[in-house]
Amino acid sequence: MRAGVEAVGMSWRLCWVLVLVCAGCAELRNAVMPSPAPRTQEAQARVPSPRCPERIALEEPLEADLVRTLGARSFVPGVSLSQLGLLRSPEGLEVQGSFQSQLKLADGPVELVGVMLQGGAGLLLLRPEADGYCVVNTWSTWLSADVRYTLDSSWTSPDGRLAILLLKMVVAPGSGGQETRWVVLGTDGWRAWIALGTPPQHQLLVPSVSLKPKGKQLYLDVKLRRTSRLALGKDGRFITRQ
């Protein structure tokens, strides 16, 4: 009888030893083969960005480079300054947001993001794509003084084929020598262009410019001493008299 009791006790002790050994094996296995850690930001950064549609024209920035990494057909995760890589300019100047608007075109929406920096202004045209945006193109200019910069107005054609943008810049605002400049751009959602003039002679230094829709036609009123009215051509550019 005593031998049977000892045998039972031995069996229990052996079970406990096996439990402890198995627990130790599990700890050792976890130490040698730890569970996969979440991917770091650096590893995530190596993941290829979504490809932007080839229909976006690979054209040079309008007038000047805002940031080379924001060329046509490049991908950005969002429209905030940090997501655009625009917390600072290449010269180290602080960049500020000016405006954000959306165009509703037949081929899909286009986001407009305006930015300002000391002695400059810029505009990004972005198409929603995947979990971010694709750059259609950018426009920017560099001046010798501070700028107050806005999207004065915009017009979309009745068929949604294209849109015209009127940008307004007040250079050296609040000073006795301030001047007002206007820039007219066009876009069809896949490319952007200067709709009046040729860079760098496309900034209008006049007191007033306005978009005047009339039926399906769009006119541009340019006021200096007198008002000149220009009609929008089929190519999305305003027709000037030669």
Image (spheres, rainbow, N blue to C red):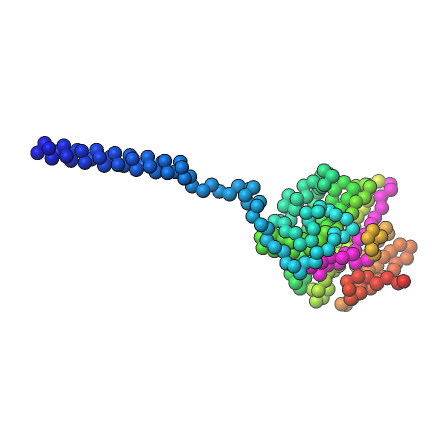
Q: Quadrant of the N terminus?
A: top left
- Quadrant including the C terminus: bottom right
Q: Residue furthest right?
A: 225
Quadrant of res 184: bottom right
Q: Say which residue appears at 86% left-offset and 62% top-offset.
A: 240
Magenta residues, start to end: 176-196
Q: Is residue 141 above or below residue 193?
A: above
Magenta-colored stretch includes residue 185: yes
User: At x 82% / y 58%, what residue is drawn?
Assistant: 196
Compare residues 117 and 5 and report the one nearer the observer: 5
Residue 151 location (% of width, % of height): 74, 52
Q: Residue at x 67, y 41 (%)?
A: 87
Outermost left residue: 1
Q: Which sits in the foreground, 42 or 242?
A: 42
- Taking the spot 77% from the left edge, 62% from the top edge, the residue there is 236
Say whether residue 104 is visible. Answer: no
Number of numbered discs on residues: 0
Q: Is residue 9 above or below residue 199?
A: above
Q: Quadrant of residue 97?
A: top right
Residue 201 part of the magenta segment: no
Residue nearest the viewer, comparing 50 with 159: 50
Residue 37 shown left or right of residue 93 in the figure: left
User: Viewed as shown, does residue 28 lie left or right of 1?
Assistant: right
- Could one spot residue 89 in this view of the protein? yes
Q: x%, y% of residue 50?
A: 59, 53
Give the x, y percent position of residue 182.
Answer: 81, 52
Residue 205 position within the rendered picture, expressed as x and y whole percent measured from the top left: 86, 50
